[in-house]
Image: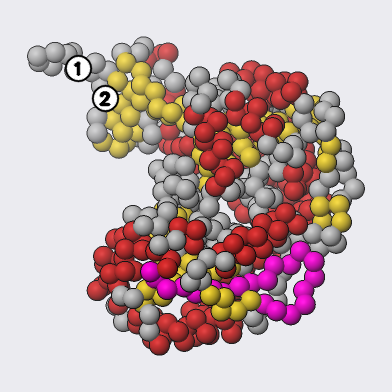
Amino acid sequence: MITGKNQIGFSQSALGKTTFKTFNPILNTENKTLFFEASDDEINQAVALASQAFETYKTIDGAKKAIFLRAIADEILDLGDALIKMYCSESGLTETRAISERGRTIFQLQSFADLVAEGSWVEASIDTAIPNRQPIPKVDLRKMFVPLGPVVVFGASNFPLAYSTAGGDTAAAFAAGCPVIVKSHPMHAGTGELVSQAITKAAQKTGMPKGVFSNLNSSNYQVGSKLVSHPNIKAVGFTGSINGGRALLNLASQRPEPIPVFAEMGSVNPVVMLPQAAKQQAQKWAKAYADSITLGSGQFCTNPGLILGIKSEDLSKFIKTLADEIVKIKPTCMLHPNIIGAYESKKTSALAQDGLREVVSFSDAIPKNYGRQTVTTVEGVAFSNNPKLHQEVFGPFTMVVQCENSTQLETIISKLEGQLTGTILSENNDIESHQNIVSALQNRVGRLIFNGVSTGVEVCPSMQHGGPYPASTDSRFTAVGIHAIKRWVRPISFQNWPNNLLPDTLRNENPLNILRLVNNHNTRKTL
């Protein structure tokens, strides 16, 4: 049952006087439930509980944390159709998408459960003492990862489940040993409350401390700002706009004790079409990219918003075919009137720039809040000289840049902002004679794709979802896959520490039977 209240530890609370409702973009009406924005007292209470919970939760072993994570997955599944219906009513996304995203959320939780149950993720490293080493003895040193402390996670507008309340950030933080306070996204506060209830039930059933999780409602930036500024918060996870992520990064860096902000932000995900791909596979790639650009109304962080090629008749043919294919696809509903409003505004601003030409835009009548897909094109020199054309237009929009030659193409790529992905389309080993372009692209992205599309992010250990700024605030870390756990930990070394007082992870006996680096050799053996 949806109450509109904040979840603070194991209790619900509604002390705030500011209220708001979510919106159904399909029906173009507000949903019924009134949500209460968290008050200052509720914010402080949630942080205090999280701080208290950390002292216990950081000591809970991997096996018990795994049980907790799997219990969350089970409770989410037990929500059944109620969660799916709420998701659709607040996002305009389809039931099929909702079920798929729920499956991804469950898989993420289970993946982290498997990781912490096995235990080697802490990267235990042991260098034993050499007392008689000359000219000075060598001390005994042992290192491992430990959790940072209470974490704030901001729910994402475009992924009400997989990047929100129990999404990848929350799952990774729980796995690391960090209590989580979610700042629920106002566009899907009902979905967030249902998932919060599932997490709370799981925490109670598995004996977790009551402050291990809280969920706070807010319709503006104030609650989030107060959370990030609170001295007991030790890290932040965010998925959203560059402006939002940058504001949080600035806020966190200005604290007396600066804290890390792991923000995954804007990306135009450049696609480089090499000459032979344009010559031989224009039809194939035009259809594939028409589908990719319009998938989910273009509301993915990996949406291909920029296609670059060398000017030719073949590239012109690709542009025409892309335009023909993309208007065959029926537009779909966008997440919220504010989202489609921003899309239309940014599209209009882009089209007002000198040199940018609209190739096609879907022109038939469409329902309210549906996004019209648009293909544009621009000459390389105009694109290169206008940074405004480099910015993301969040929605079903793409721009084809026609470069004069490979030198100009390489220069343009090297001057792009950081991106999540970069794609090379190549035929007949054309890529082998364009390694300078590949090298330039590699310097600007977190994931290189060969002959594919950028939409679709596999959840697995080898996925890197992050990139140079502003794709993310720290390109060394991924927001997807089990290695995301490394954002919420720090290394600590124990020097000459008594064996019986060491964490199990570092004891001579290796009671957890984990893989450790002992004197530069990976082993599970005891010392």
Amino acid bearing label 1: Lys
Mark 2 neighbour class, 10 Å CA radius: few under 14, some 14 to 19, many 20 or more: some
Q: Residue at 17% x, 13% y: name it.
A: 137
Residue that protrudes farthest toward the left in the picture: 135
Sort mark 1 into few (<14), some (14-19) or many (20+) by Cα contacts within 10 Å: some
Residue 333, by quadrant, is bottom right
Q: Secondary structure at mark 2?
A: strand
Image coords of residue 68 (percent x, y): 64, 35
Determine the secondary structure under disc 1. Answer: loop
Q: Which image quarter is the N terminus in? A: top right
Tag 2 residue: 127
**Residue 521 sits inside the magenta stretch:** no
On residue 319, the disc is: none
Q: Quadrant of the C terminus?
A: top left
Residue 328 falls in which quadrant of the image?
bottom right
Q: Relative to 194, is 44 above or below?
A: above
Residue stretch rendered in magenta on the structure: 362-381
Q: Quick check: 414 above or below 328?
A: above
Q: Nearer the viewer, residue 506 or 495?
A: 495
Task: Name the residue rendered at 76%, 60% in the picture.
Answer: 92
Residue 316: where, in percent of width, then height?
A: 45, 84
Q: Tell me if residue 395 can be seen.
A: no
Q: Which is nearer the eye, 331 or 72?
A: 331
Check disc 1 and report the residue beneath it: 138
- Real-space Cα separation, disc 2 to disc 1, in angstroms: 9 Å
Asked whether the residues under the numbered discs 2 and 1 touch, taking CB atoms below 8 Å apart as contact, a structural biologist would say yes
Nearest to N terminus: mark 2 or mark 1: 2
The residue positioned farthest toward the right in the image shown = 32
Can residue 142 be seen at all in this image of the molecule? yes
